[in-house]
Image: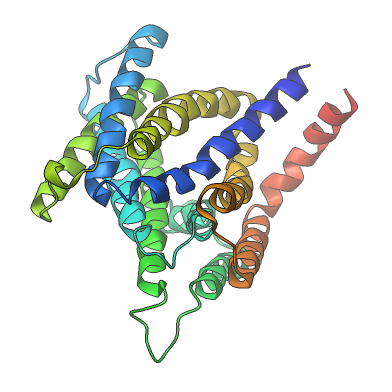
Amino acid sequence: MTRYRNLLLFVLLAAAWGSAFMAIKAGLEFIPPVLFAALRYDVAGLLMLAYAFYATDQLIPQTRGQWALVGIGATLLIAGYHTLLFIGETDPAVTSAAAAVIVSLSPVLTTGFARVFLPEERLTTVGIVGLLLGLVGVAILSNPDPNNLLTGGAVAKLLIFGAAAAFALGSVLTSRIDASLPIETMEAWSMVGGALIMHGVSVGIGESFADVVWTVESIAALAYLSIVASALGFLVYFDLLERLGAIEINLVSYVAPVFAALAGWAVLDEVPTTYTVVGFLVIFVGFLLLKRRAIRAELPRLRRLVRS
C-alpha cells in the first residue's frame, strides 16, 4: 500500500510541477513576468508560513547560519530561478515542454556545482561526459541559428538555462552552510524573501500593477501556481523526500516535462518539436551517467519494494 501511495504522490507532484509551466505561459498573457512571479510567492509564502507554524517547533530562524540558508534560498532558489524562468517563458518560441526540459537540467548542474564548491567531491571521466551531455542537450533544444541568434527563442532558452543554473547553485550553497533549520521554515521564509526581491526587480524594470489584466484566466493561473504547484507541491515534495530520498525524488524533473507537454498541448495548442524530445533524451542520459553509482546503489532497495 505504501508503494502505491508513494507512486501516486510522485505522479501527482510531476503533474503539478509539469503543468505549472503551462500555467506560467497562460498567465503571462495578462500579468508582467517578474510581477507575476512575485505575486505567486506572496501567496505561496504566506501559505507555507502557516504550515511551518503548524508543522515545526521553529518558525523564525535564529542564528546567522539559519538566516544565511534563507538568504540563499530567497535570492537563488526563488528570486533568481523564477525571475529568469518567467521572463524566458514570455517568448512565444518557448513552449511549456521546452521550458520544462531545460529546467530538468538542474540536477545535472547541481552535480557539476557540487564538484566545484565541495572539494571532497570529484568528477570521474564518465561524470564529465554526463555533465557535457546535459549541456549538449540544452544546445540541441535551443537550436540556435548562427545567422540570427537573437530570434527563434535561443536567448529566452538561455535565460531559462540560467534559471536552472541559479537553482542548482543555490541547492549546492545551502548544503555548504553548517546550520540546521526545518525545511518547511526555510522554504516559507525563502518564498517570502524571494517575493520581496522580485517585487523590487519588478519595480526596477518598470512593471506596474496597472499592466495587470484581471480575468478568470489570469486569476486561475495565479491560484494554480501559488496553491497547487507551490504550496501543495512542496508539501508533497517534503513527504516524498523523506520517504524516497534525493535520488528518486530528482526523477520528478524528468517526468514533469511529459506533463508540461500534455498540458501545453491540451490548453495552449503547443506541439513539442523534435528538438525538444531529442534534447530531453540527451539531458536524461547525462543525468544517468552522473548519478550512475547512486542509482546502482538504490537498485536493490527498489527491487525489494517491487517484490513487496
- Residue 173 located left or right of residue 65: right
Relative image position of residue 191 (x, y in whole percent): 29, 32
- Residue 205 picture location, percent across and down: 12, 56
What is the x, y in percent for residue 57? 35, 8
Tell me, yes or no, if residue 82 can be seen here.
Answer: yes
Q: Nearer the viewer, residue 120 or 33?
A: 33
Q: Residue at x 47, y 42 (%)?
A: 20
Q: In the rendered view, tell whether residue 126 sits above or below residue 166.
A: below
Q: Position of residue 51 (x, y in %)?
A: 38, 14
Residue drawn at the location 67% of the way across and 46% of the way down: 294
Of all residues, the one furthest to the right in this rendering is 307
Of residue 215 and residue 287, the one placed in the foreground of this image is: 215
Q: Is residue 130 above or below residue 250?
A: below
Residue 209 sits above or below residue 143 on the image: above
Quadrant of the snapshot with the N terminus = top right
Asked if residue 182 can be seen in this view, the reply is: no
Residue at image location 51% in from the left, 74% down from the top: 139
- Residue 231 vertical position relative to residue 197 in the rendered view, above or below: above
Residue at 49 percent across and 54 percent down: it is 96
